Image (tube, rainbow, N blue to C red):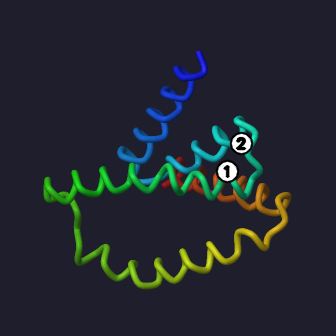
Amino acid sequence: MKKLLYAAGGFAVGILNGFLGAGGGMLAVPLLKRQGLAQKNAQASAIAVIFPLTAVSAAFYLFTHKVAFPQALPYLPAGLVGALCGVWLLPRLPDKLLRRLFAIFMLWAGIRMLLG
């Protein structure tokens, strides 16, 4: 039964990631926490889950010519710096603050999607 739940959770994470271009991590973190991981471990592990899913989605969109490189490329350098800052910052934040920041981001993203 657990394997079926893991498969369903993985499918949901993958479909969110591939369909929306994001959001898989937002679902992966709570699923990983349900397995008993601490907030920091769940967020770090979600990246490990999302990376191969994103690579598959990106490859598909590249091969089907759906990626708009000229518009996407300017975000890459600062995005890489931001990723390094996030990796450095994650272990330094208290779990309670991290949970709240994650919740605020989820609410903000949801509201923007509903209103935008």
Using residue 67 as the reference point, say whether residue 98 is left or right of it.
Answer: right
Label 2 is placed on what type of residue? Lys
**Residue 34 sits above or below residue 7 on the image:** below
**From mark 1 to mark 2, how far is it between C-alphas?**
6 Å
Q: Residue furthest top?
A: 1
Residue positioned 60% across, 21% down in the render: 2
Residue at the disc numbered 2: 33
Q: Secondary structure at mark 1?
A: helix
**Residue 7 sits above or below residue 24 on the image:** above
**Residue 28 percent across, percent down from the top left:** 58, 44
Neighbour class for label 2 at 10 Å: few (<14), some, many (≥20)? Answer: some
Tag 2 or tag 1, which sits nearer the N-term?
Answer: 2
Quick one: 89 or 108, which is closer to the camera? 89
Count of numbered circles on the image? 2
The label on residue 32 is none
**Residue 40 percent across, percent down from the top left:** 72, 58
**Residue 107 percent across, percent down from the top left:** 66, 52
Using residue 72 as the reference point, say whether residue 43 is left or right of it.
Answer: right
Neighbour class for label 1 at 10 Å: few (<14), some, many (≥20)? Answer: many
Report which quarter residue 82 is drawn in.
bottom right
**Residue 56 percent across, percent down from the top left:** 30, 51
Label 1 is placed on what type of residue? Ala
Residue positioned 65% across, 59% down in the render: 105
Residue positioned 72% across, 53% down in the render: 103
Image quarter of the N terminus: top right
Residue at the disc numbered 1: 42
Quick one: 91 or 103, which is closer to the camera? 91
**Residue 5 sits above or below residue 103 on the image:** above
Report which quarter residue 31 is drawn in.
top right
**Residue 85 sits above or below residue 27 on the image:** below
Q: Tell me whether circle 1 and circle 2 mark residues in contact (CB < 8 Å).
A: yes
Quick one: 98 or 68, which is closer to the camera? 98
